[in-house]
Amino acid sequence: MTVRLSRRYGFFASHRLHSRALSDEENRETYGKCNNPWGHGHNYEVEVTVRGKVDPRTGRAIDLAVLDALAEAEILAPFRYRNLNQELAAFREVVPTTENLGLEVDRRLREAWTKAFADGPSLEKVRIWETERNICEVEAQAGEGQR
Amino acid sequence: MVISKKVEFSASHICRSAQLTDAENERVYGAAANPLGHGHNYVVEVAIEGDPDPVTGMILDLKRLREILEEKVLNVYDHRLLNREVEPFDRVVPTVENIAIDIWNRVEGSIRGRAKLHSVKVHETNELCVEYRGEA
């Protein structure tokens, strides 16, 4: 039987929303307080949803120890207590909005997925909370990291 | 259209499979493999699907859904040791995956009329949740 399992993780990081394609004035209008040149931070939460068959031996749809290790290696360790703009190559040019952060989390998980879960569950979606009110959902792109 | 109802129960369980060695059980289930058991406050969201009745504006009377969930799920699961007191967990590991599937099986036959069961979502903790949509 096939189920969808969601696992939630958290990390703290800082960022600044500022696009080089916009003027200073436009940046202030577009991002408001998030454009503060000194940056600011959030308690981010990431929810990873996978789709898989329940193994009758274990009652599990995914090996949670492997999923946790993958999330730690690909997302939490690289992002935790970081300045996203300055310390992550992906955000040197790309603005670290919740949307772009969601896409980057999805990309990192998909890249490592097949190696970790060769014949196992597929990555279905990623949700990321910047705050309780600001949430972005990324459906995993078919083809990569999928069975 | 899909509408869902949320209920909660508290129960204890032991996540150990007789088909695995002790070392495998520890690796797969971590601290949840403690043979003396531990518990959770489970949150269950049951979603039903259908078109609203043109007269009542409802897919299913939610009071009726609440009664079904109380009778079929809460009365069976609440404040129980799942491995000992709730079938099929005498022979199936009561992971959150298997709990979602079992709740589906218990509830599905009672959803009648214009409504059909859409999904059962069970939150074991804030960090772990499973959704079952009746797929093979």
Image (cartoon, coloured by chain):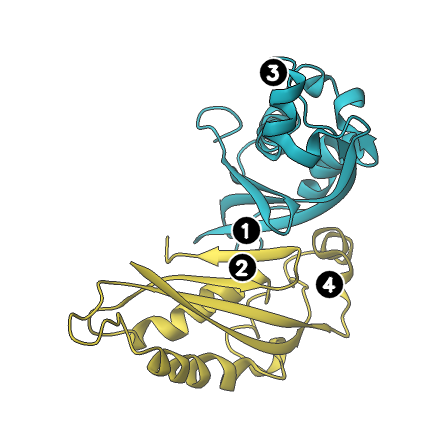
Chain colours: A cyan, B yellow
- The label shown at residue B32 is 4
Specify the amino acid type for callout 3: Leu
Circle 1 chain: A
Circle 2 chain: B
Is label 2 or label 1 in front?
Answer: 1
What is the quadrant of residue B72 in the picture? bottom left
The image position of residue A110, as x and y in percent, is 58, 28
Left of B2 or right of it: where is B123? right
On screen, A141 above or below A132?
Answer: above
What is the quadrant of residue A100 in the picture? top right
Specify the amino acid type for callout 2: Glu
Gap between marks 4 and 2 measured at Cα: 14 Å
Residues indicated by labels 4 and 3 sit on the same polypeptide chain: no
Marks 2 and 3: CB-CB under 8 Å?
Answer: no
Is label 1 or label 4 in front?
Answer: 1
Marks 2 and 1: CB-CB under 8 Å?
Answer: yes
Picture residue at 69% right of the left edge, 41% below the top: A66
Q: Secondary structure at mark 3?
A: loop
For mark 2, does the 10 Å Cα neighbourhood hold few (<14), some (14 to 19), or many (20 or more) residues?
many
Q: Is the N terminus of chain A in the top left, top right, bottom left or bottom right quadrant? A: bottom left
